[in-house]
Amino acid sequence: MQTFSSTSVSIQRDTRAWQFQVWASFAVAVFLCATGLSWLPGEALDRAFMVMGYVFCLSTAFMLAKFIRDSQQAEGTAGRDVPMWRLVVWGSFFTAMGLTGWGLVRMEINDAYKAFLGVSWLFLISSAFTLAKTLRDRHEADLIDARLQGRRAARQEAAASAAAE
């Protein structure tokens, strides 16, 4: 946390341990999903469907996380998203999750293998939400830090020009 003497603003940042845990969890989830999908028995078309489903779910999870965060920040301002965008975001997420889950349930593979793929898939989605939040928090902290640095530099320049006069 940084505190500036002439300002009462403090910047909350995630610890390095938390950032490592988030990235490690996401990497493990990706690894588990990739392993499960690469060893998936059956037709190549089944594997391709499941890979597309996992990628679709992952991208919509990041999109949904951004949408929710943006909507929260825009409350009470004119910068809100249109209702159709809300439908697209939520619809895409539920479509991706539903189709991928449907494909997983309907596949003719061992139940233990289905359970592995299902758990790794849910782990991937939950770690994607956590990663999205962590990245957004860091971005916002960097923006606040840059603004405070700019203000401090402007005050120093103003003080230097006032002293030179």
Image (cartoon, rainbow, N blue to C red):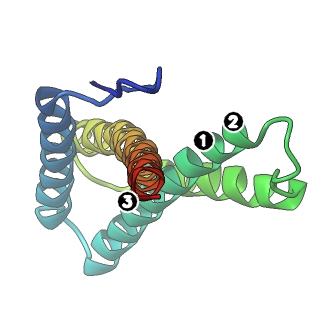
Q: CA distance from mark 2 to mark 1?
A: 5 Å
In this rendered view, identify the residue nearer to me: 110 or 21. Answer: 21
Residue found 11% across the figure and 57% down from its top: 35
The residue identified by callout 3 is 54
In this rendered view, identify the residue nearer to me: 138 or 50. Answer: 138
The residue identified by callout 1 is 69
- Across and down, in percent, residue 43 comes to 26, 75
For numbered disc 2, what is the local secondary structure? helix
Lateral position of residue 56 relative to residue 51, left or right: right
Lateral position of residue 120 relative to residue 77, left or right: left
Residue found 17% across the figure and 60% down from its top: 34
- Across and down, in percent, residue 79 comes to 81, 53
Discs 2, 1 touching: Cβ within 8 Å: yes
Give the mark, 1 or 3, whose residue is nearer the N terminus: 3
The residue identified by callout 2 is 72
Q: Which mark is residue 34?
A: none
Query: Which of the 4 quarters of the picture holds residue 113?
Result: top left
Residue found 56% across the figure and 50% down from its top: 66
Count the labels in the image: 3
Q: Quadrant of the N terminus?
A: top left
Up-down relation of residue 159 to residue 73 (above or below): below
- Going by the numbered disc 2, the residue's amino acid type is Gln
Q: CA distance from mark 3 to mark 2?
A: 27 Å
The crowd level at tag 3 (other Cα within 10 Å; few <14, some 14-19, many 20+) is many
For numbered disc 1, what is the local secondary structure? helix
- Across and down, in percent, residue 143 comes to 44, 50
Q: CA distance from mark 1 to mark 3?
A: 23 Å
